[in-house]
Amino acid sequence: MLAAPVPPIPAHSLLVFLLQVALLGLLALGLGLLATRFGLPAIVGELTAGVLLGPSVLAAVAPDLSGWLLPHDPAQMHLLDAVGQIGVLLLVGVTGTEMDFGLLRRRRATALWVSSSGLLIPLGLGIAAGLVLPASLRTDGSEHAVFALFLGVAMCVSAIPVIAKTLMDMNLLHRNVGQLTLAAGMVDDAFGWFMLSIVSAMATAGVTAGQISESLAYLLLVVAFALVLGRPLARAVLRPLASAGDGPPIAGAAVLMLLGAAATQAMGLEAVFGAFVVGIVIGNGRAVGLAKLAPLRTFVLAFLAPVFFATAGLRIDLGKLADPVVLGAALALLAIAVAGKFAGAYLGARLSRMNRWEALALGAGMNARGVIEVIVAMVGLRLGVLNTATYTIIVLIAIVTSVMAPPILRVAMRRIEHTAEEELRLNERLGTAQDAP
């Protein structure tokens, strides 16, 4: 017997969804422009759009309107989350296309030093902080060691989507420091997703050596596939499309990014990692010039990414900070998070013989944790490792560190000279240089 066809989305749910996306897009646009007027990146205003529509403001001021526009219905919210996820995956993929592997090969020691020290120092400080935090910040059923490890993971991650958006907003992605920041952030995030899978397993059914080996094997498999087969496959798919007009190569690149995200998601890693790797493969495979992908980059940066960041802000509840214990812990953990990431990245850069301004810029970029830390916090909340108070603290750290990055980057980058290589990279992105064969 054939199953009945799946009914279409109800009319009211569709209406609410369309209003949600339109209102989030409108607020993100307006507040993003306002943020840039005050010298801040657009992402600050975009996150604020979600905070205004979430429990911190709208639910407190107009609960009936909030309940209608943002109902506590998982199916309704999942529609909005789906749009946000497409936006963040394409944002990360587009960012990957602009990674310069030639620079990374020449300065791989610097990237490894920065990523290693920028990861291990905050990881250690986060674990130590988790061991001494008050018991009221843990759930009753969570083990102390698992909670501490989870907090360490939250402290050590960076946020490629936020770093990428910030660097793009500030026109710094073509700079050497921007490229190194993304490379180091990619290493940190790959390790962070690996550790998250291990700690999540410890929080549920325990973890075995086999599970650790499997996660590590998948990570190495993705890297090996990208290095050996990725570029030939990307060229085989995109080169025929490049001669078919402007639209096909854009669609082909977007499809490849989403397939890469699906692959790593299926492996238990994280979808953004797969999208980023595919973006790198497309950009370095020279299957299609970066100028051909400019319309995709414009649409993602102008609409999809702002909607994603606004959606992330919807889950922030600043009312939790009214508790003095929560506020005190938040300030302490914020100080630990900032000091650990800055100290680690700065130390790694100086050990690689970079000057103090380059080291400061790398520290500022690596310190931006953004929505990746929010995702980690949401996983901890779902698994019962974090309670709502600790979740709020981690989200606060994500926002504050993301807001801190632009002013520090602006100060540091004024003192770092442009190079001919950076200008060539910028011209290639804008389409003023001839595409390489």
Image: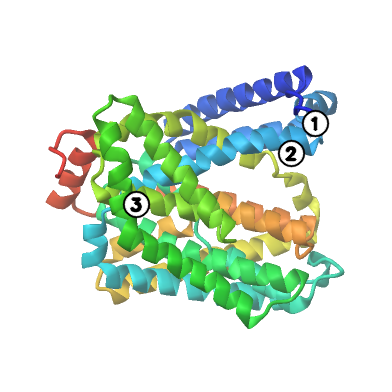
> Which residue in the structure is indicated by mark 3?
280
Q: Measure the alpha-carbon separation of dots 2 and 1.
A: 15 Å
Q: Residue at point 37% right, 48% down?
A: 279
The numbered disc on residue 56 is: 2
Q: Measure the alpha-carbon separation of dots 3 and 1.
A: 39 Å
For numbered disc 1, what is the local secondary structure? loop
Q: What residue type is labelled 2?
A: Ser
Q: What residue type is labelled 3?
A: Ile
Of marks 2 and 1, which one's residue comes earlier in the chain? 2
The image position of residue 330, as x and y in percent, is 68, 60
Of marks 3 and 2, which one's residue comes earlier in the chain? 2
Q: Is residue 57 left or right of residue 266?
A: right
Along the viewing direction, whichever of 339 and 149 lies nearer the viewer: 149
Point out the frontmost of discs 3 and 1.
3
Q: In which quarter of the image is residue 334?
A: bottom right
Along the viewing direction, whichever of 290 and 414 lies nearer the viewer: 290
Of marks 3 and 1, which one's residue comes earlier in the chain? 1
How was this image coloured?
Answer: rainbow
The image position of residue 186, as x and y in percent, is 43, 60
In the picture as drawn, the residue positioned furthest to the right comes out as 140
- What number of labels is visible? 3
In the picture as drawn, the residue positioned furthest to the front comes out as 1
Q: Is residue 239 left or right of residue 334?
A: left
> Which residue in the structure is indicated by mark 1?
71
Point out the frontmost of discs 2 and 1.
1
